[in-house]
Image (cartoon, rainbow, N blue to C red):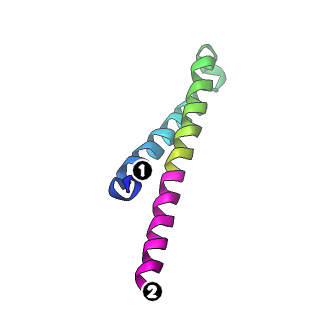
Amino acid sequence: MLVRDYPYVHLAIGIFGNTAFLVGSVLFFERFSHWHHTAVWLFVIGAAGMLVGALGKAAKDIYEHVEKKRKQG
């Protein structure tokens, strides 16, 4: 399974999302008002990255839980 075999992928996507979210948040300060459009898109991209990262982790955890129960009988 892709999520299980490459756990660092959803982790990297989550970190990218968190970073984009943070940078987008900073760009909302008044000093950076001319970057408003970029801030909005970084905010949206960051939120999407965080969601994908969390869904990947959830899928991995669920898969591992199901496998553990299956092995126990």
Q: Secondary structure at mark 2?
A: loop
Question: Residue placed at 64% from the left, 26% from the top?
Answer: 29
| Direction right: furthest residue | 30
Q: Nearer the viewer, residue 60 or 16?
A: 60
Look at the image and give the residue range highlighted in magenta: 55-73
Query: Magenta span has 56?
Result: yes
Classify 28 as above or below 11: above
Question: In the rendering, which numbered label is found on residue 22?
Answer: none
* Circle 1 or circle 2, nearest the eye: 2
Q: Amino acid at mark 1?
A: Leu
Query: Residue 8: where, in percent of width, then height?
Result: 36, 51
- The residue nearer to you, when weighing 27 against 48, is 48
Q: Secondary structure at mark 1?
A: helix
Q: Position of residue 3 (x, y in %)?
A: 41, 54
- Badge 1 vs badge 2, beta-carbon distance below 8 Å: no
Is 24 left, or right, of 13 in this rendering? right
Q: Residue furthest top?
A: 34
- Residue 2 painted magenta: no
Q: Position of residue 59 (x, y in %)?
A: 50, 58
Q: Earlier in the sequence, mark 1 or mark 2?
A: 1
Label annotation for residue 73: 2
Q: Quadrant of the C terminus?
A: bottom left
Q: Give the main secondary structure of the magenta stretch.
A: helix
Please name whichever residue, 20 or 56, is drawn nearer the observer in this view of the structure: 56
Label 1 CA crowd tier, 10 Å (few <14, some 14–19, many 20+): some
Residue displayed at 46% across by 65% down: 63
Which residue is outermost to the bottom? 73
Q: Which residue is mark 1?
A: 11
- Label 2 amino acid? Gly
